[in-house]
Amino acid sequence: MAMTEEEKREIAMMTADILSKRNEPKISPDWRKLSDEIRDFIKSRTANTNKDGVGYMTIQNSIYMPIKYVLGLKDVRQITADQVPTARKIFEFIRALKEENE
């Protein structure tokens, strides 16, 4: 049984759709931007004098763990663009509390 032209076009369209999705970023660009801000904040806390007296990973975990808990994620790389505003609120809250208590 031979394929019709319509079936061939449909298969070609499905293949093109699959291939175009392979090029989409696996991690949300919005999350990348926020994680860069978090990284810069942590670096500022650990630079030279180490203001907090704790390491980079400790500070990072203290920010990422509440984000993961609230959003119900196992890994922050699973954050979607829709979840980034909530993650940002959590980060801003933690940062404000830290600055308030200095």
Image (tube, helix red, strand yellow):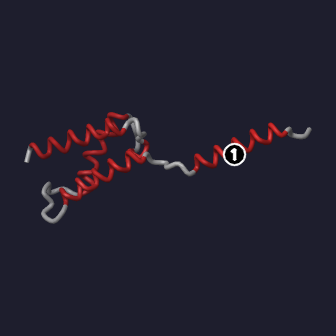
Which image quarter is the N terminus in? top right
Query: Residue placed at 12% from the left, 63% from the top?
Result: 49
* Residue 6, picture quadrant: top right
Q: Nearer the viewer, residue 25 or 75?
A: 25
> Which residue is depicted at the point 41% across and 48% down?
29
Q: Secondary structure at mark 1?
A: helix
> Which residue is rendered at x = 14% and y = 45% of the image?
98
- The image quarter in which residue 3 lies: top right
Residue drawn at point x = 69 percent, y = 41 percent: 14
Q: Residues within 10 Å of mark 1 (few under 14, many from 20)?
A: few
Q: Position of residue 73 (x, y in %)?
A: 40, 38
Q: Is residue 73 left or right of residue 97?
A: right
Q: Residue furthest right?
A: 1
Image coords of residue 52 (percent x, y): 14, 54
In the image, 41: left or right of 10? left
Q: Nearer the viewer, residue 93 or 73?
A: 93
Q: Which residue is mark 1?
A: 15
